[in-house]
């Protein structure tokens, strides 16, 4: 499916577009042979789109067991490449999240690792400020000064920018996490530790910070939602949301993203699955929690029993656009109404023998654009970055 190359260039290729109704844009994929390439985030620009990716991954896991590079692509409105670049990072850097400051400046976070002979050491949290042309403006490894003297082995998993401050979630390899707040010069403003936590995520509005994490034993897993003061991280309120009750097939309960939309906060992720439910799937089920920002009360809980988790959501006037995935990591992009009823779905089954992962979506006019990765099989070591665009009204490829 890919072209062979020993160089570090980002070799272009185009996935044959699905010929049903001959879409104008359809799907595009780009990558190198015998490597795993994943699209992480995609942003609309005045000329089309810009995306940031993990590329040239020689193994299907993180830098603790392989190599990777960070890539940047500029695309036109038809998702064709205008420019592409491999960023100046080490071959052990792993990209987790990207936040846009403005049209020309981005924050990239993840981890960097070191090697000793043939052995790879666990990574250290890495933050970079880059331009839209791929120039590295500033770089920081989150160290003990940011974590109060604790071990700094871990990875950045979430970044938010608001009013000149940078909010960084660092998951450590000791089951603790930190919210580290920096100014634009990467100077530390304040920090907050979250002990015995997993899947921490953050979102920020004009006045407050909202932090979500899972905690508790596997048998008693719950999600904690915190509203903090922006000035110093002091707690305004803390709410705990319980898992599904009853006899469960799977007790996982965690949030992938915390997303602010107006006066509401959406927590998206996975929830415990009860035995004897409407689906025969194993593993957890997808969930969206709509939280009132003022009170922290749950206003709406949408369960997705045909999915294992939710990875992204966009709010519409008449409902939601949702990316979910099943136990095989196969995607489902769907529109639901405000009550959770499916309006349309575009899913992995529509892609014949391909296995697709989707990680990020956005909406421009009447189109939904997305990025992720595509390969012949789930465990295929030749996966390419995928871009696509579907109509918001019917879910068909543009």
Image: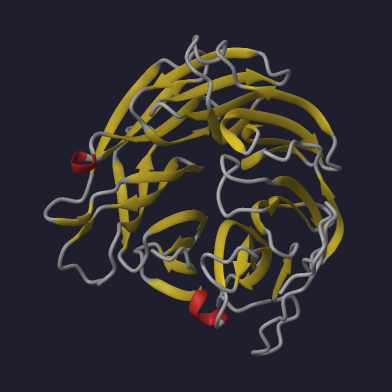
- Examine the rendered structure and indicate whether residue 208 appears above or below residue 398: above
- Between 10 and 292, the one nearer to me in the picture: 10
Residue 160 can be seen in this image: yes
Residue 273 placement, left or right of 61: left
Q: Is residue 256 above or below residue 364?
A: above
Q: Which of the colour schemes (rainbow, by chain, secondary structure, one colour) is used?
A: secondary structure
**Residue depicted at 61% across the width and 53% down the height:** 59
Q: Is residue 16 above or below residue 206?
A: below
Where is 134 relative to 83, above or below? above
Q: Residue at x 66, y 53 (%)?
A: 58
Question: 26 or 152, which lies in front?
Answer: 152
The picture places residue 34, in percent across and down from the top left corner, at 69, 63
Q: Nearer the viewer, residue 321 or 25?
A: 25
Q: Residue at x 72, y 75 (%)?
A: 15
User: Residue 223 occupies which quadrant of the picture?
Assistant: top left
Q: How many marks?
A: 0
């Amino acid at each position: 499916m890919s072209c062979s190359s020993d160089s570090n260039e980002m070799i272009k290729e185009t996935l044959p577009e699905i010929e049903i109704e001959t879409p104008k844009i359809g799907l595009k994929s780009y990558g190198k042979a015998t490597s795993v390439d994943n699209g992480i985030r995609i942003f609309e620009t005045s000329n089309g789109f810009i995306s940031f990716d993990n590329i040239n991954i020689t193994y299907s896991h993180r830098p603790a067991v392989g190599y990777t590079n960070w890539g940047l692509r500029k695309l036109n409105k038809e998702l064709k490449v205008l420019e592409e670049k491999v960023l100046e990072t080490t071959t052990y850097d792993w990209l987790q999240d990207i936040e846009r400051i403005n049209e020309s400046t981005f924050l990239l976070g993840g981890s960097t690792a070191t090697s000793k002979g043939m052995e790879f050491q666990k990574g250290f949290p890495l933050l970079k400020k880059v331009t839209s042309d791929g120039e590295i403006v500033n770089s920081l490894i989150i160290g003990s000064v940011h974590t109060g003297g604790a071990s700094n082995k871990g990875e950045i998993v979430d970044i938010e920018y608001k009013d000149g401050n940078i909010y960084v979630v660092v998951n450590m390899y000791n089951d603790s996490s930190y919210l580290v707040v920096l100014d634009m010069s990467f100077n530390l403003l304040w920090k907050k530790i979250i002990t015995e936590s997993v899947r921490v995520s953050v979102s920020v509005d004009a006045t407050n910070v909202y932090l979500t994490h899972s905690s508790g034993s596997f048998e008693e897993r719950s999600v904690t939602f915190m509203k903090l003061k922006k000035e110093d991280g002091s707690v305004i309120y803390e709410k705990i949301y319980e898992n599904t009750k009853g006899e469960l097939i799977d007790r996982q309960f965690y949030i992938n993203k915390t997303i602010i939309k107006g006066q509401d906060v959406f927590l998206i992720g996975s929830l415990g699955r009860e035995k004897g439910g409407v689906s025969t799937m194993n593993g957890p089920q997808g969930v969206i929690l709509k939280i009132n920002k003022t009170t922290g009360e749950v206003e709406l809980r949408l369960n997705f029993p045909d999915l294992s988790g939710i990875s992204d959501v966009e709010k519409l006037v008449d409902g939601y656009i949702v990316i979910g995935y099943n136990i095989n990591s196969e995607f489902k992009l769907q529109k639901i109404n405000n009550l959770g009823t499916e309006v349309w779905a575009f899913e992995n089954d529509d892609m014949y023998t391909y296995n697709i992962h989707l990680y990020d979506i956005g909406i421009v006019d009447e189109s939904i654009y997305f990025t992720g990765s595509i390969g012949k099989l789930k465990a295929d070591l030749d996966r390419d970055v995928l871009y696509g665009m579907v109509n918001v009204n019917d879910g068909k490829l543009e």
